[in-house]
Image (cartoon, rainbow, N blue to C red):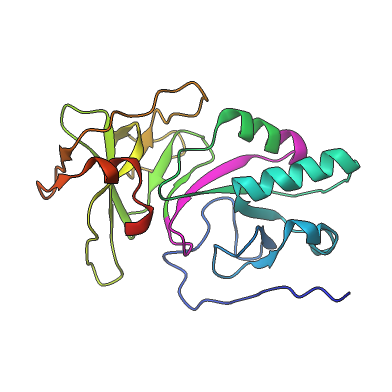
C-alpha cells in the first residue's frame, strides 16, 4: 500500500513560522488527523513507520494525536528518536496543555515539549519559549489582555491587514505580564496558565474588554473557536 504524504509550502513565513528551536534547516513533520500547520510534511498517526523514516528533528501536532503516537510507541516498544523538540498545538477554544500530558510526551520522545497556541488554520498566536515561562504573544497575529479586576484573559486576533477580530474570552484564567522573560524576550506573556486537571474553570460572566468596551457574552468566554 502506497502512503501519500500531504505537503504544502507557504511563501509567507512571518505568521506561521515555528519559533525556537526550529531553524531553517530543521527537518519538521506534523502528525494528526489533518494538517494544522502550513509547510511541514503531514502524517496520520498510523503512518508512524513512514514518519520515523523521515528522521524529523522536530515533531508537531495536536496533543491528542501526539499522545496517541506516544501510546503506540510505548505499547510496541518503538524507538522514535527526535533531535530537537516537540511542539504541542493548542487550538483557540481549548485549555492549555495539562502537565500530565506534557510529562507523557517528554517521557515518550525524550525532548523538550513546547506549547503553541494556534488558530484552526495554523496561525501561531502565542508560543512557549525555551525558558518554559508562559506563552509569548505573537504581536503580528494577536493581542491577549486581562480584564480589569477579573481573572479572565481575552484574545483579540489581528489580521494581516491590521484588522482586529472580535474579542473573545479564551476559556480559562491566567495573567498577562510585560516583564522581560528569562529567555531574553520582552514581548507580552500569558503566565500562570491552568495546567493541572484540578484547576477550576473560569466563571461564566459577561465582561467588558479593555480595548473596545464591548460586552463579551458568557458563551464567548467559554469558547471562541468559531470566531478564530
Q: Nearer the viewer, residue 86 or 14?
A: 86
Q: Nearer the viewer, residue 96 or 223?
A: 223
Q: Nearer the viewer, residue 108 or 171?
A: 171
The verdict on residue 161 being magenta is: no
**Residue 215: quarter of image:** top left
- The reply to whether residue 228 is in sight is no
Left or right: residue 129 compared with residue 55: left
The residue that appears at 49% across and 29% down in the rendered structure is 195
Left or right: residue 145 compared with residue 26: left
The verdict on residue 113 being magenta is: yes
- Quadrant in which the N terminus appears: bottom right
Considering every residue shown, the one lying at the far front of the view is 219
Left or right: residue 215 compared with residue 129: left
Q: Position of residue 19 (x, y in %)?
A: 51, 54
- Quadrant in which the C terminus appears: bottom left
Q: Position of residue 197 (x, y in %)?
A: 52, 25
Q: Position of residue 156 (x, y in %)?
A: 26, 52
The residue that appears at 16% across and 26% down in the rendered structure is 149
- The reply to whether residue 2 is in sight is yes
Considering every residue shown, the one lying at the far left of the view is 213
User: Which stretch is magenta?
Assistant: 106-124
The residue that appears at 34% across and 50% down in the rendered structure is 224
Would you place residue 119 above or below residue 189 in this image?
below
Would you place residue 223 above or below residue 228 in this image?
above
Would you place residue 87 above or below residue 199 in this image?
below
Q: Position of residue 203 (x, y in %)?
A: 29, 28
**Residue 75: quarter of image:** top right
Amino acid at each position: 500500500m502506497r502512503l501519500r504524504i500531504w505537503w504544502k509550502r507557504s511563501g509567507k513565513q512571518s505568521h506561521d513560522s515555528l519559533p525556537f528551536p526550529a531553524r531553517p534547516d530543521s527537518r519538521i513533520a506534523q502528525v494528526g488527523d489533518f494538517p494544522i500547520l502550513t509547510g511541514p510534511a503531514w502524517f496520520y498517526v498510523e503512518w508512524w513507520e513512514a514518519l520515523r523514516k523521515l528522521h524529523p528533528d522536530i515533531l508537531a501536532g495536536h496533543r491528542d494525536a501526539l499522545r496517541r503516537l506516544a501510546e503506540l510507541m510505548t505499547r510496541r516498544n518503538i524507538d522514535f528518536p527526535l533531535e530537537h523538540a516537540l511542539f504541542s498545538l493548542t487550538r483557540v477554544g481549548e485549555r492549555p496543555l495539562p502537565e500530565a500530558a506534557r510529562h507523557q510526551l517528554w517521557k515518550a520522545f525524550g525532548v523538550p515539549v513546547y506549547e503553541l497556541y494556534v488558530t484552526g488554520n495554523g496561525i501561531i498566536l502565542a508560543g512557549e519559549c525555551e525558558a518554559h515561562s508562559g506563552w509569548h504573544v505573537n504581536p503580528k497575529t494577536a493581542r491577549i489582555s486581562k480584564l480589569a479586576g477579573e481573572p479572565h484573559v481575552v484574545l483579540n486576533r489581528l489580521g494581516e491587514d491590521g484588522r482586529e477580530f472580535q474579542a473573545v474570552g479564551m476559556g480559562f484564567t491566567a495573567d498577562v505580564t510585560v516583564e522581560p522573560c528569562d529567555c531574553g524576550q520582552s514581548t507580552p506573556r500569558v503566565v500562570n496558565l491552568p495546567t493541572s486537571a484540578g484547576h477550576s474553570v473560569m466563571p461564566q460572566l459577561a465582561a467588558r474588554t479593555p480595548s473596545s468596551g464591548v460586552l463579551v457574552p458568557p458563551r464567548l468566554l467559554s469558547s471562541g473557536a468559531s470566531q478564530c
